[in-house]
Image: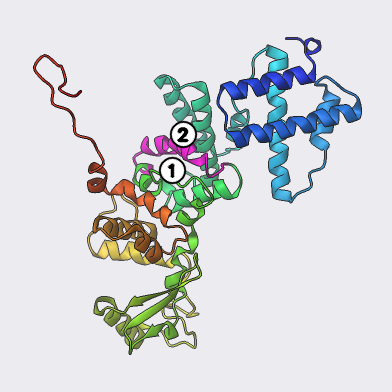
Amino acid sequence: MKEDQMKLNGLIQKVMDQMDERRYGKKIITRYRSSFRLLISVSHDIGEDRLSERLMKAFLDRPVSCGEKWAIKELAHRKRCLRLLLSLMRTGNIGWRRQDTGGISEKITNKTFRSELECFTSSLEQEGISPNTMSGYKRIVAYFLLFCEKSGYGKLSDIRTNDISTFILSLYKDGRFRPSTIGSGLAGLRRFLSSNDHTAQFLLEIPVHLPREVKIMEIYNDEELAAIRSLRLKDIDWEKDCISILQSKTKKTLVLPLRASYGNDIADYVLNERPRSGSDYVFLKAFAPFGRLGTGSIYEILKKLEGLAGIKKEERPVGSRTTRHHAASSMLRAGIPMSDISAALGHRDPNIVSVYLSTDARSLSACTLPLPPVRKGGASDAR
């Protein structure tokens, strides 16, 4: 289709019609419609009724009355709108496939990581994965390899526990994925991690079910260790045998019983092992300066304890998220109400705990329907 064969309004109408046919969400259609209205408004201002270079530049240059972070997202969306219209104008078909995957891949400078991405893409092609799905998988894997590169890693075997969850959170914070769409993108990351012996052990950091709103922040939040690191001597009531913890997410105080199983160990640490310091934090660094524990200290401690206990690390991650996940799953299997589990974990929304349902095989099996009996010859008795 040549440029002079269709005016701007006709191009836009065709794109919107196909969005309806493809059953795009109401919010997505509304956003595209708003952007296309702006494009039409700009075309009236400059006297252009066709998709010319002059009109596209004026459209992209139109100021955005919002913050810098949102302005970047808005510019990317406007470019996406123009790509849809250009593909229709030039070929007669709308190119729905996102065009930024190649650009992301080119940013990877590490030869080992580039080779990993090429091998992954080749395996997808051999499996006959559709182009759109392949593009989405390649996109998130490219982001992940860039994340590894920026973290100073030179190969996949350098990846450590909590890197996957940190990466997932960065995707949301940077605006590369929305909470409602990041779940489908993670399917590609899961496939990539499972194809490598070293990275397969970190699959546990990708939950089976993700919240479809901003609540994803509550699952992947580095502040979940703040309660331990921020525990002060005054928070322990030795007379009433209880500990008061200010939860970082809900800002509510959680009062827990000071059981002998760990209360005696805390007392032994404070009296005999804790360094002499003017700090009122309970747990301090073992070497001077004797300040509060750092963010990575809990991981190192758990790693050391698992080693002393003879727990093999093969094909399983270590760290606070693993113990937290195990504690939640154990409470769920014990029949503790989800609201109580949510309160203990410090989640604002009780529904967040539904993420842990994927580990409760017994409860999930209770939801299955029995197979109907089958008579001889293959016919079912079910009516």
Q: Is residue 30 left or right of residue 206?
A: right
User: What's the residue type where badge 2 is placed?
Assistant: Glu
As drawn, which residue projects farthest toward the left?
Answer: 376
Residue projecting furthest to the front: 383
Q: Position of residue 107 (x, y in %)?
A: 61, 37
**Label drawn at residue 156:** 1
Which residue is disc 2 drawn over?
116
Assess whether residue 184 is covered by the magenta stretch.
Answer: yes
Image quadrant where one finds the C terminus: top left
Quadrant of the image containing the N terminus: top right
* Mark 1 residue element: helix
Rendered location of residue 218, percent (x, y): 48, 56
Q: Dot 2: what SS?
A: helix
In screen coordinates, is 47 left or right of 112? right
State the image quarter where residue 224 is shown. bottom left
For the residues bearing labels 2 and 1, Cβ distance under 8 angstroms: yes
Dot 1 crowding, Cα within 10 Å, few <14, some 14–19, many 20+: some
Tell me which amino acid carries mark 1: Leu
Location of residue 377 with respect to 76 vertically, above or below:
above
Q: Residue at x 49, y 66 (%)?
A: 250
Instruction: Judge from the rendering whether residue 50 lies leftward or rightward of residue 225; answer left or right.
Output: right
Where residue 165 appears, as percent x and y from the top left, is 46, 51
In the rendered view, tell whether residue 166 sits above or below residue 369. below
- Residue shown at 73% from the left, 38% from the top: 75
Q: Is residue 149 magenta?
A: no
Left or right placement of residue 365 versus residue 66 in this view: left
Q: Overall secondary structure of the magenta stretch? A: helix
Which one is in front, 4 or 306? Answer: 4
Q: Which stretch appears magenta? A: 177-199
Can residue 96 be seen by looking at this rendering? no
- Asked whether residue 173 appears in the rendered view, the answer is yes
Q: CA distance from mark 2 to mark 1?
A: 9 Å
